[in-house]
Every structure is written in structure tokens, then in C-alpha cells.
């Protein structure tokens, strides 16, 4: 999967402990995406921070993100296809988009000069 530093592992564990192991309380406060890195700033929903500097910053290389998307089948779904020449239906994984191309093409928010928002 993704290799992360021991310091980041410790910080993630402190965040998980601080939300009493309720992962639904962890939210993305802000994000930024470049050609090489997706940066997420994480915080507790019940303890909002005053600035982005107080949030936990997690950097994920796009290459690793693409690997996770492909491994977890997040870019495809189980569906039914029709054979093009023999006219029979069969079940298959239907790919929605290649990993990370969909993220890079996301539109910017119309009132924002910042990075594209992840929806």
C-alpha cells in the first residue's frame, strides 16, 4: 500500500485516539492537488481548528493514489455488458475512468482561484 513515515503514523494514531476511534468524526479541512502530490489537511469535526496550520497534513503521491484507486476498484463497478457481435449479456467490471485522470480534470469552483475541489 502506501509507505508513510513513523512520525505521520504517530500523528494519525493521535488523531484517531482523539476522536475516540470514531472515524466518521475525521474530516478533510482543506485539500490541494498538484501534478505529483495530493495534500489533505485532516481535523476532528467536533474540534474545528482556527487555521490550517493546526490540522494534520497528509501528502499522498498521485502515483500511490492511482495504485489505491485501481487496487480497491474505486474507478469501476460491477455491471452487465452486451457482447458487441454475439448479442449476449455478461457480467464484468466497468471502468468509469482511468485512475487520477478524473481527479485532474475536475472543474474549479466558479468563485475560486484555488485548486479544483474534490467531490
Image: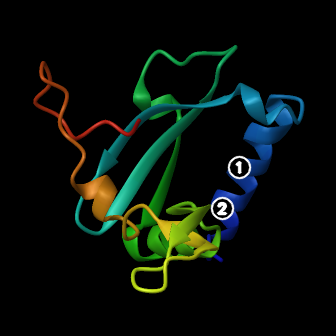
**67 displayed left or right of 117:** right
- The one nearer the camera, 94 or 6, is 94
**22 displayed left or right of 105:** right
Visible residue check, residue 118: yes
| Image quarter hosting the N terminus | bottom right
Question: Please, is residue 97 above or below residue 84 in the view?
Answer: above
Label 1's element? helix
Question: Please, is residue 74 above or below residue 46 in the view?
Answer: below
Label 2's element? helix
* Residue 43 on image: x %, y %: 60, 30
In which quadrant of the rendered view does residue 104 lie?
Answer: bottom left
Q: What residue do we see at 31% from left, 57% from top?
A: 102
Q: What residue do we see at 57% from left, 76% from top?
A: 88
Q: What residue do we see at 31% from left, 45% from top?
A: 32
* Residue 37 on image: x %, y %: 34, 63
Circle 2 residues within 10 Å: few <14, some 14–19, many ≥20? few
| Image quarter hosting the C terminus | top left
User: What numbered label is drawn on residue 7?
Assistant: 2
* Residue 16 on image: x %, y %: 79, 40
Q: What residue do we see at 32% from left, 54% from top?
A: 103
Visible residue check, residue 69: no
In which quadrant of the rendered view does residue 84 lie?
Answer: bottom left
- The one nearer the camera, 101 or 84, is 84
- The one nearer the camera, 32 or 91, is 91
Question: Please, is residue 39 above or below residue 77 in the view?
Answer: above
Question: From this viewpoint, which residue is outermost toward the bottom?
Answer: 86
Cα–Cα span, label 2 and label 1: 9 Å
Question: From this viewpoint, which residue is outermost toward the right?
Answer: 20
User: What numbered label is drawn on residue 12?
Assistant: 1
Amino acid at each position: 500500500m502506501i509507505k508513510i513515515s513513523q512520525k505521520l503514523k504517530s500523528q494519525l494514531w493521535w488523531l484517531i485516539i482523539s476522536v475516540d476511534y470514531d472515524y466518521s468524526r475525521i474530516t478533510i479541512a482543506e485539500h490541494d492537488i498538484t501534478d505529483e502530490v495530493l495534500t489533505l489537511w485532516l481535523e476532528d469535526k467536533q474540534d474545528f481548528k482556527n487555521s490550517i496550520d493546526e490540522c494534520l497534513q497528509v501528502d499522498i503521491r498521485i502515483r500511490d493514489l492511482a495504485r489505491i484507486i485501481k487496487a480497491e476498484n474505486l474507478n469501476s463497478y460491477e455491471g452487465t455488458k452486451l457482447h458487441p457481435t454475439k448479442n449476449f449479456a455478461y457480467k464484468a467490471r466497468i471502468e468509469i475512468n482511468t485512475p487520477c485522470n478524473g481527479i485532474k480534470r475536475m472543474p474549479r469552483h466558479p468563485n475560486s482561484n484555488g485548486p479544483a475541489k474534490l467531490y
